[in-house]
């Protein structure tokens, strides 16, 4: 069994691979004070008793990388593959500063390397638009995610309530909660549709569109551009990177 850790700013996504198949992920709230033993308490029942043959880590939270390394070595007795410079990915990063590209973006891009030219839209803490063509990451857009937008709206106003994010039945709301829900859901969907058109115009071709990330299943319902929903794209890419680097 292979264990995968995708460490994001909001959640740590954990999955296992058994017989080549990815299992449904476990989510742990990201807390930079977590120790290796505390992480183990969260995951031990999920991992179960099957022997751990390998571990791969993709992290955008450096303070949690070492506890995961300690967990791998001390409790599972394996040396993890960490996505960093020098690790084989098969992806060429054609950006001004490749070292700045987040591990999650790289994993998502690797997952579709053998497919046609693609725009990946990762709806996480931030929304990332990742353009991949000819096994190259050729450009990225980063915008505030739905949760960030909602927190900014609530935190910057005195009278607006903290609400659950959901899609209202109508775009035009008739009460405060629906007005706010509409703004952050239909607003993001309109942003996605608009940026897809702008990106396709800029690159001069139609692209395969893939939505992924925590809130993608919700927003996918109101995005008008034809697309595919891939909930586990980053973890799939991380497993492919593990396969390229296993000894």
Image (tube, grey):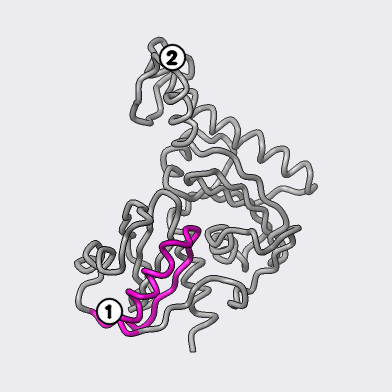
Q: Foreground residue, 204 or 108?
A: 108
Residue on which disc 2 sits: 173
Gap in angstroms between the C-alphas marked 1 and 2: 52 Å
**177 left or right of 50 in image:** right
User: Looking at the rendered structure, which numbered label has been put on residue 75?
Assistant: 1
Label 1 secondary element = helix
Residue 199, located in which quarter of the rendered image?
A: top right
- In the image, which is nearer the foreground, mark 1 or mark 2? 1
Tell me what residue is drawn at x 31 percent, y 55 percent: 28
Tell which of 167 and 48 is nearer to you: 48
Spot occupied by residue 6 in the image (x, y as percentages of width and height) = 43, 62
> Residue 148 location in percent, x, y?
48, 36
Whether residue 35 is situated above or below residue 211 in the rendered picture: below
Residue 76 drawn in magenta: yes
In this picture, which residue range is highlighted in magenta? 50-77
| Residue projecting furthest to the top | 174
Q: Where does residue 159 sit, x and y in percent of width and height?
A: 39, 14
| Crowd tier of the residue under label 2, counting other residues whose Cα lies within 10 Å: few below 14, some 14–19, many 20 or above | some
The answer to whether residue 145 is magenta is no
Secondary structure of the residue carrying tag 2 is loop
Q: Are the residues at dot 1 and dot 2 in contact (C-beta closer than 8 Å)? A: no
Q: Residue drawn at (47%, 24%), measured in percent from left and top?
A: 153
Tell me: 137 left or right of 19: right
In-image side of 107 versus 33 (left or right): right
Q: Nearer the viewer, residue 93 or 96?
A: 96
Could you tell me which residue is drawn at 50 percent across and 58 percent down? 60
Mark found first going from the N terminus, 1 or 2: 1
Residue at horizontal 33%, vertical 79%?
A: 1
Choose top left, top right, bottom left or bottom right for residue 221.
top left
């Amino acid at each position: 069994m292979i264990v995968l850790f995708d460490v994001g700013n909001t959640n740590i996504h954990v999955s296992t691979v058994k017989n080549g198949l990815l299992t449904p992920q476990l989510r742990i709230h990201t807390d930079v004070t977590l120790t290796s033993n505390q992480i183990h308490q969260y995951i031990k029942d999920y991992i179960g008793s099957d022997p751990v043959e390998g571990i791969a880590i993709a992290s955008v939270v450096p303070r949690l990388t070492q506890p995961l390394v300690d967990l791998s070595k001390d409790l599972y007795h394996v040396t993890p593959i960490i996505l960093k410079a020098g690790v084989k990915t098969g992806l060429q990063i054609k950006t001004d500063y490749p070292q700045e590209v987040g591990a999650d973006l790289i994993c998502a891009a690797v997952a579709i390397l053998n497919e046609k030219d693609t725009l990946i839209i990762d709806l996480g803490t931030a929304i990332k638009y990742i353009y991949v063509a000819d096994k190259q990451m050729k450009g990225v857009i980063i915008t505030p995610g739905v949760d960030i937008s909602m927190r900014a709206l609530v935190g910057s106003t005195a009278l607006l309530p903290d609400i659950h994010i959901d899609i209202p039945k109508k775009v035009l709301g008739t009460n405060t909660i629906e007005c706010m829900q509409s703004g952050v859901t239909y607003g993001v969907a309109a942003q996605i549709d608009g940026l897809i058109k702008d990106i396709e115009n800029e690159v001069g071709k139609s692209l395969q569109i893939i939505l992924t990330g925590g809130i993608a299943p919700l927003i996918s319902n109101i995005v008008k551009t034809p697309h595919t929903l891939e909930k586990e794209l980053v973890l799939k890419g991380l497993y492919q990177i593990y396969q390229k680097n296993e000894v």
